[in-house]
């Protein structure tokens, strides 16, 4: 067989394969999706709890987008305005029976309506187990977060409100509360109240938390003059009750150098020839939470007496 005939035969069979593949794809696209089963969260409907349908389906062409349609029923009556997979808890009445019908469409074909089993609405047994605020010891720079533990709370939505020193904070209705945004200070007390979204009249309160001050603590300072090298030294140590990192900034005197560790440091200033006067050290310590502490020390240099009269000046914040 000549090469031309071989090429012609190969092309013929390739054409048949492509045609068969296109025919199969067109056939797949023309098939409706198949709903296999529908599950619910929670598994059993309960009074006042949101009821959500999870649909498992199969479609011949995985590239096609599937659209789901829903109908919800209670005791044989169609519930209007609920075309999604979620039925609000307000529609779940104790002792009633609810079910759904689901239809899937792939843009070309749609499945027949799939009817779920009828489920009886129970009490549910929802109960708040614990409500609390994190962190438990907040500072003026923290954002507080609501924490809720409850029994049988799948599908339950909550609403929140916050109080400061017993007063309701207007507009604070989220899961988080910014302390700096509301300009709270040390000693202010914050309390969280939580209710189910469909029972907004029944709020439950957390234990209050108090805004605390985590001021940096002066753990000791020392200032001395080394005559051998004609240099004044200022050493210091600072403690952060929160255990965070401390940064140090040297403000004076001009020309001094600063060496620091995790919570301590040394500033040094070489005394110019013939200098006679006061040397003032000032170092600012700052924490990661925004607290600051001013560290100061001063001494008088007398070239005539060749000695130093140390006069440590207490620093404040």
Image (cartoon, rainbow, N blue to C red):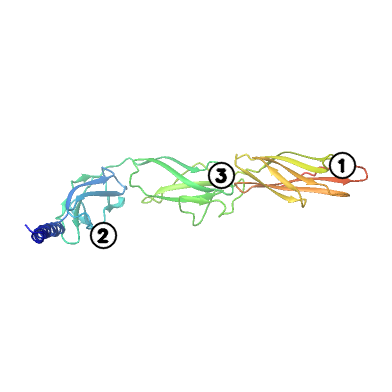
Crowding near pointer 1: few (<14 within 10 Å), some, many (20+)?
Answer: some
Looking at the image, tell me whether mark 2 or mark 3 is earlier in sequence order: 2
Report the mark closest to the observer, 1 or 3: 1
Q: Tell me which corner region of the image, top left, top right, bottom left or bottom right, holds residue 122.
A: top left
How far, Cα to Cα, is label 2 from label 3?
45 Å
Position of the N terminus, as image quadrant, is bottom left
Q: Is residue 105 above or below residue 289?
A: below
> Percent x, y for residue 160?
44, 50
> Percent x, y for residue 85?
26, 53
Q: Nearer the viewer, residue 242 or 183?
A: 242
- Residue found at the far right of this picture: 304
Residue with the mark numbered 3: 138
Q: Tell whether label 2 touches label 1 (CB within 8 Å).
A: no
Q: Which mark is residue 81?
A: 2
Looking at the image, tell me whether mark 1 or mark 3 is earlier in sequence order: 3
How far, Cα to Cα, is label 1 from label 3?
45 Å
Crowding near pointer 2: few (<14 within 10 Å), some, many (20+)?
Answer: few
Looking at the image, tell me whether mark 1 or mark 2 is earlier in sequence order: 2
Q: Nearer the viewer, residue 240 or 176?
A: 240
Look at the numbered disc 2 and give the secondary structure of its residue.
loop
Q: Nearer the viewer, residue 189 or 25?
A: 25
Q: Which mark is residue 308?
A: 1
Name the side, left or right, on which 313 lies relative to 182. Answer: right
Count of numbered labels shown in the rendering: 3
């Amino acid at each position: 067989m000549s090469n031309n005939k071989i090429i012609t035969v190969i092309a013929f069979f390739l054409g048949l394969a492509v045609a068969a593949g296109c025919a199969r794809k067109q056939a797949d696209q023309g098939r409706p999706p198949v709903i296999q089963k529908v599950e619910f969260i929670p598994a059993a409907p309960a009074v006042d709890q949101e009821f959500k349908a999870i649909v498992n389906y199969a479609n011949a062409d995985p590239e096609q987008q599937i659209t789901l349609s829903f109908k919800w029923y209670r005791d044989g009556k169609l519930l209007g305005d609920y075309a999604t997979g979620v039925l609000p808890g307000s529609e779940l009445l104790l002792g009633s029976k609810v079910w759904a019908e689901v239809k899937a469409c792939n843009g070309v074909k749609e499945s027949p309506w799939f009817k779920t089993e009828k489920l009886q609405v129970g009490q549910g047994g929802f109960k708040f187990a614990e409500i609390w605020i994190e962190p438990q010891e907040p500072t003026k720079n923290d954002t507080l977060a609501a924490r809720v533990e409850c029994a049988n709370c799948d599908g339950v939505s909550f609403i929140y409100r916050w109080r400061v020193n017993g007063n309701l904070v207007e507009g604070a209705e989220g899961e988080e509360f910014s302390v700096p945004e509301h300009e709270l200070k040390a000693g202010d007390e914050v309390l969280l109240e939580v209710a189910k979204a469909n029972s907004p009249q029944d709020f439950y309160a957390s234990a209050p938390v108090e805004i605390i001050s985590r001021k940096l603590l002066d753990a000791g300072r020392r200032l001395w003059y080394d005559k051998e090298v004609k240099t004044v030294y200022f050493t210091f140590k600072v403690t952060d009750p929160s255990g965070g990192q401390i940064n140090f900034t040297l403000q004076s005197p001009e020309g001094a150098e600063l060496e620091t560790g995790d919570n301590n440091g040394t500033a040094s200033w070489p005394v110019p020839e013939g200098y006679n006067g006061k040397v003032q050290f000032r170092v600012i310590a700052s924490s990661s939470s925004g607290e600051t502490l001013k560290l100061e020390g001063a001494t008088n240099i007398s070239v005539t007496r060749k000695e130093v009269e140390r006069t440590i000046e207490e620093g404040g914040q």
